[in-house]
Image: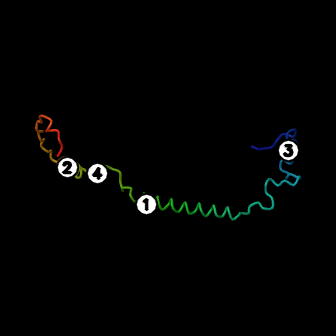
Amino acid sequence: MSLTLPAGVALPVTASALVLAQQPGNGDNGGQGEDFGKSSPVGFLVLILFLIAVAFLVRSMTKHLKRVPASFDDPPAEEQPEAKQPEATAEPEKPEVAEKPTKGPSATKAN
């Protein structure tokens, strides 16, 4: 299979390719002037600040990853009965104290 163009189409295609491939002749280099590619001190400062921020983020992520458990699987069957023991270690119920009935205005006075 060959990729040749018919004779009637080849001339317009090659002519348009030559026109499109030419550099503009009006002095515009597409934004690539004399200072293209040069960095300023402000750009260098911003780059340094980004690198410092990334260093702090990596440090924080490392601390958080150390807290992650080795496995998220359920504990083995031997440890499950121990997990249910907090019901037995709960605080014992306190007996209710009956309130004394009060009569008259002297019962409402505070000491």
Between the C-alphas of marks 4 and 1, the distance is: 24 Å
Residue 85's disc number: 2
Residue located beneath label 3 in the image:
16
Name which residue lies at 18% across and 48% down.
91
For residue 68, side relative to residue 77 (left or right): right
User: Which amino acid does the dot numbered 2 rest on?
Assistant: Gln
**Where is residue 75 shown, x and y percent of the image?**
28, 51
User: Which amino acid does the dot numbered 1 rest on?
Assistant: Lys
- Proximity of marks 3 and 4: CB atoms separated by less than 8 Å: no
Residue located beneath label 1 in the image:
63
- Vertical position of residue 47 compared to residue 13: above or below: below
Q: Camera-side residue: 51 or 10?
A: 51
Q: Camera-side residue: 104 or 23?
A: 104
Between the C-alphas of marks 3 and 4, the distance is: 72 Å
Residue located beneath label 4 in the image:
75
User: Which amino acid does the dot numbered 3 rest on?
Assistant: Ser
**Where is residue 16 shown, x and y percent of the image?**
85, 44
Between the C-alphas of marks 1 and 2, the distance is: 32 Å
For residue 14, side relative to residue 41 (left or right): right
Between the C-alphas of marks 3 and 2, the distance is: 85 Å
